[in-house]
Structure formats: C-alpha cells, structure tokens
Amino acid sequence: MKLTPLDIRQATFGSSFRGYDRKEVDFFLETVAREFEVLARENMEFRERLLALESTHNELKKKEGALTDALVSAQKIMDEMKANAQKEGELILKEAELKAEGLIRAATAELSHLHGEIFDLRRQRDLFIEKLRSYVRGFERALLWDEGEGQEEIVRPQKESLS
C-alpha cells in the first residue's frame, strides 16, 4: 500500500493515558507530510526526466543504427568503386598492350616491306648501272671502231629496254 502526504495528514491515533503530546505528533505528521510531498514531487519530476532521457536515448540509438548502416553502405560502395576502378584500369592497360602489339606488328610489317622495296630499288639501280655501262661500252666500241677504220658512218647503238 502506497502512503501519500494526504494519508499522513489524516492519520489519527488513539489516545492513551501516557500517550504522546498530540500537538507534537500533529506537528511532526505535518512536517513529514510536507517532506513526503516534496519527495513525491521530486520523484515524479525524476520519472518524467527519466522518460524524456530514455526517449532521447532511444532516438539516439536509432540514429546511431542509421549512421552505422550508412557507414557500412558507404564502405561497401567505396569497396565496389575501388574494385570497379581496378578492373577498368586493368582493361585500359590490356587495351593499351593490345594496341601496342598491333602497332609493333604493323611497324614490323612496314619495316619488312621497306626492306623489300630497298632491296628492289638496289637491284634496279644495279641493273640500271649495268645497262648504262653496257651502253657506254657500246658507244666506246662504236667510237673506237669509227676512229680505227676511218669510216664516217655514225654507229647507232642498239636500243635496249631499261626494265
């Protein structure tokens, strides 16, 4: 059973021959009732404050949970972005390597082609020089023959193709 300040104020005691002084008992009961009232009010205020603090605590716990979830999500997203960036970097590197290999193959083929052309041009040059020497020898012979025999005929060299 809960005792209230009103219960204390309304308390009555039976009297006896050698009982307590009634005024002192009433004064004491009134003092106890006032103190009890103050304590009851403080207790009520503390309970209300406790409820408010518990409510705030629960809200903060929810916010903490939401922040934790957000941090976990952000970490996952960051990890995924990092992995994607790594994969993209590897793809770019592979593409660059493939392009480089293709350029090297093309340059090697072009070099080989140029070597072939140089070889053909040298062969054509040598043929041209050989034909030119042949013409010069033919002209020399013709000139020497003309001088040696005293003929006034002009010797015409035979036409040879340069191809």
Image (cartoon, rainbow, N blue to C red):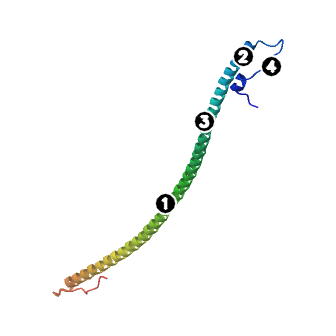
Q: Is residue 121 placed above or below 56 in the rendered structure?
A: below
Please name which of the two marks, 1 or 3, marks the residue nearer to the observer: 3
Identify the element where label 2 is drawn: helix
131, 54: nearer the viewer: 54
| 98 left or right of 40 in image | left
CA distance for labels 4 and 3: 45 Å
- Labels 2 and 3: the sequence-earlier one: 2
Residue situated in front as seen by the camera: 53 or 43: 43
Per the rendering, the mark at residue 76 is none
- Towards the viewer: 41 or 89: 41
Residue drawn at the location 33% of the way across and 75% of the way down: 125
Q: Which mark is residue 52?
A: 3
Residue 45's place in the image compared with 69, above or below, is: above
Amino acid identity at mark 4: Gly
Q: Residue at x 53, y 54 (%)?
A: 81
- Disc 1 from disc 3: Cα separation: 58 Å
Query: Nearer the observer, disc 2 or disc 3?
Result: 2
Q: Is residue 157 left or right of residue 4?
A: left
The numbered mark, 1 or 4, whose residue comes first in the sequence reads 4
Q: Which mark is residue 26?
A: 2
